[in-house]
Amino acid sequence: MSNKFETKKLFWKIVDTITTNKEIWVKNNEKEIIEEGMVLPSGASVTFGLESGALTIYDKNMNAVYRFKEDNHIVVIFKELLEQVEEA
């Protein structure tokens, strides 16, 4: 299993990529921007919650599929899995 530093480093690298390439914004009922993100080639999107500090993955219909914060090891697990797939 990965260490906390590796998990946080990868999480914030994802956040940086999303916020640098932002092209969508999610607003609350008061029309305030609460998330900003990017659309992936599949039509899915990933956003960063400006107040929550969480990444949210949405399907192409903007239904939330998965939400996680910087201490969730899922980012490193998926990175390792994708590396194995690429090598196969």
Image (cartoon, rainbow, N blue to C red):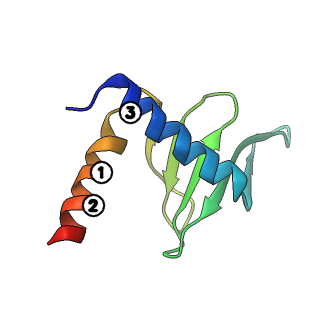
Q: For residue 61, what is the image quadrant?
A: bottom right
Q: Are marks 2 and 1 in contact (CB under 8 Å)?
A: yes
Q: Which residue is mark 3?
A: 7
The amino acid type found where label 1 is placed reads Phe
Q: Which residue is mark 2?
A: 82
Q: Which residue is mark 1?
A: 78
Q: Position of residue 5 (x, y in %)?
A: 40, 26
Furthest-left residue in view?
88
Is residue 81 positioned above or below 75 on the image? below
Q: Are marks 2 and 3 in contact (CB under 8 Å)?
A: no
- Residue 67 shown left or right of residue 85 in the figure: right
Label 3 sits on a secondary structure element that is helix
Which quarter of the rendering shows the C terminus? bottom left
Residue in view at x 51 percent, y 66 percent: 44
Furthest-right residue in view?
31
Q: Position of residue 54 (x, y in %)?
A: 54, 34
